[in-house]
Image (tube, rainbow, N blue to C red):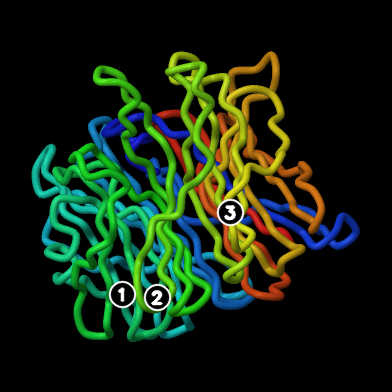
């Protein structure tokens, strides 16, 4: 998430994953210009409704401490990315972390505002087909949290998650009913007031919504492990669905999930990284799959060092993409990483990089049967970043 890049939170490897139906169907990844350049800007989230309509969101002009960041909204019209003016929130610092759209006239972008240093308000902006506007009810619905993810199902149904950096000790969920955002009660993985976060959300229908996050698990009276878990909405209630536990031999070893993609009730993907906190450069890609009964870890390529996945999307059950970044062996500069699921196995697909500095992908999106996969992130060096956008198709 973007907090890591502006020095507010712990660094989290960003990654995007893209998956093609088969090797023969894969097209070449190409870099596409996306604004704004020369403004220390990054893109954190992308969403598509068609090959000719997509939104990418992020921030620019952040100071080293994260203050004065300006919300960035870019639109793809089928030929080029162009920047759209973000509405005023009344605060000088505004960051967008994720986006989701149900149609050309209904989209959400979420993140946070900072009215003063170390004070954070959840932020939700809505697109009605004509303009973006601020939605004040979101501040109350996710009070004490920042927004990390959003799933736009229809103009009268959307969910957003909060977690990661806020005063609340637990992840929170809010729902949009077409008029206002309200907080939704979801079960907690433990009842001992230990911390939990909700990091990403996806929905393939109003009756099938998935959220992934982390919680603190008490191993002994003095030892705690941060484990991953998921929440599922089946149309009538929320339930906790357990995920594979981290190996217990290394207390510094952690699983991190950054993105989830619900294709159907029996086909869901979650991606992130497995990392030794003491040696984050040794991170490897992490991909988990829900088959309708259980979550399981699926083998995935991890080239070089510090491999991490930040996003996942699918055009079909046999065309899934995940993207992120890794550092080639012998190098200290991160490069883009794109993986493809062809229905049988994950494989690495060659992807380009910017001419200077690091290149990182943070999010990826396509549509059912879509001919274009959009991936976004950033490139350059600290304090001098530019948005990075790529396409496959």
In 3D space, how far apart are the residues under numbered discs 3 and 1 (Cα atoms)? 35 Å
User: In the image shown, does 248 or 54 lie closer to the viewer?
Assistant: 248
- In the rendered image, residue 92, in percent from the top left (x then y), is placed at 16, 51
- For disc 2, the marked residue is 107
Residue reaching furthest to the right: 24
Instruction: Please identify the quarter of the rendering in which residue 71 is found.
Output: bottom left
Q: Which residue shows up at 35% across the image and 81% down it?
A: 157
Q: Quadrant of residue 107?
A: bottom left
- First-in-chain label (3 vs 1): 1
Mark 2 → mark 1, Cα distance in angstroms = 6 Å
- Res. 294 mark: 3
Q: Residue at x 71, y 69 (%)?
A: 316
Percent across and percent down for residue 16 are: 58, 48
Is residue 90 rendered to the left or right of residue 338? Answer: left
x and y, in percent, of residue 209 in the image = 45, 68
Q: Which residue is mark 1?
A: 126
Picture residue at 80% right of the left edge, 62% below the top: 21
Q: Are marks 2 and 1 in contact (CB under 8 Å)?
A: yes
Separation (CA) of disc 2 from disc 3: 32 Å
Which labelled disc corresponds to residue 7?
none
Residue 238 at least partly seen? yes
> Which of pointers 2 and 3 indicates the residue nearer the eye?
3
In this orientation, does residue 36 appear?
no
Q: Residue 255 at x, y = what percent? A: 49, 34
């Amino acid at each position: 998430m973007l907090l890591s890049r502006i020095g507010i939170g712990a660094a989290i490897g960003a990654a995007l994953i893209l998956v093609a139906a088969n090797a023969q169907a894969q097209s070449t990844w190409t870099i596409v210009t996306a604004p704004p350049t020369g403004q220390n800007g990054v893109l954190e989230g992308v969403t598509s409704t068609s090959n000719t309509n997509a939104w990418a969101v992020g921030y620019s002009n952040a100071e080293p401490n994260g203050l004065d960041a300006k919300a960035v909204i870019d639109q793809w019209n089928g030929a080029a990315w162009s920047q759209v003016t973000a509405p005023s929130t009344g605060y000088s610092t505004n960051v967008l972390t994720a986006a989701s759209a149900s149609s050309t006239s209904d989209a959400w972008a979420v993140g946070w505002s900072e009215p003063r240093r170390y004070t954070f308000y959840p932020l939700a902006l809505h697109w009605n087909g004509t303009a973006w506007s601020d939605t004040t009810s979101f501040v109350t619905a996710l009070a004490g949290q920042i927004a990390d993810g959003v799933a736009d199902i229809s103009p009268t149904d959307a969910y957003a998650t909060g977690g990661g950096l806020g005063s609340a000790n637990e992840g929170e969920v809010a729902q949009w009913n077409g008029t206002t955002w309200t907080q939704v009660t979801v079960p907690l993985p433990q009842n001992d007031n230990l911390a939990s976060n909700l990091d990403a959300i996806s929905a393939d229908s109003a009756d099938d919504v998935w959220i992934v996050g982390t919680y603190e698990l008490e191993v002994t009276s003095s030892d705690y492990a941060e484990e991953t878990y998921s929440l599922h909405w089946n149309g009538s209630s929320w339930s906790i669905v357990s995920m594979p536990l981290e190996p217990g031999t290394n207390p510094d070893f952690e699983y991190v999930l950054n993105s989830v993609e619900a294709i159907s009730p029996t086909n869901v993907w979650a991606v992130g990284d497995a990392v030794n906190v003491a040696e984050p450069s040794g991170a490897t890609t992490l991909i988990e799959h829900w088959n309708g009964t259980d979550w399981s870890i699926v083998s995935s390529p991890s080239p070089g060092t510090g491999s991490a996945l930040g996003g996942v999307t699918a055009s079909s059950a046999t065309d899934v993409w995940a993207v992120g970044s890794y550092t080639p062996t012998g190098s200290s500069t991160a490069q883009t990483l794109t993986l493809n699921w062809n229905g049988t196995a994950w494989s690495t697909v060659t992807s380009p990089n910017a001419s200077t500095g690091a290149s990182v992908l943070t999010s990826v999106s396509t549509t059912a049967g879509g001919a274009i996969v959009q991936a976004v992130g950033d490139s350059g060096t600290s304090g001098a970043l530019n948005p990075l956008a790529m396409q496959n198709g």
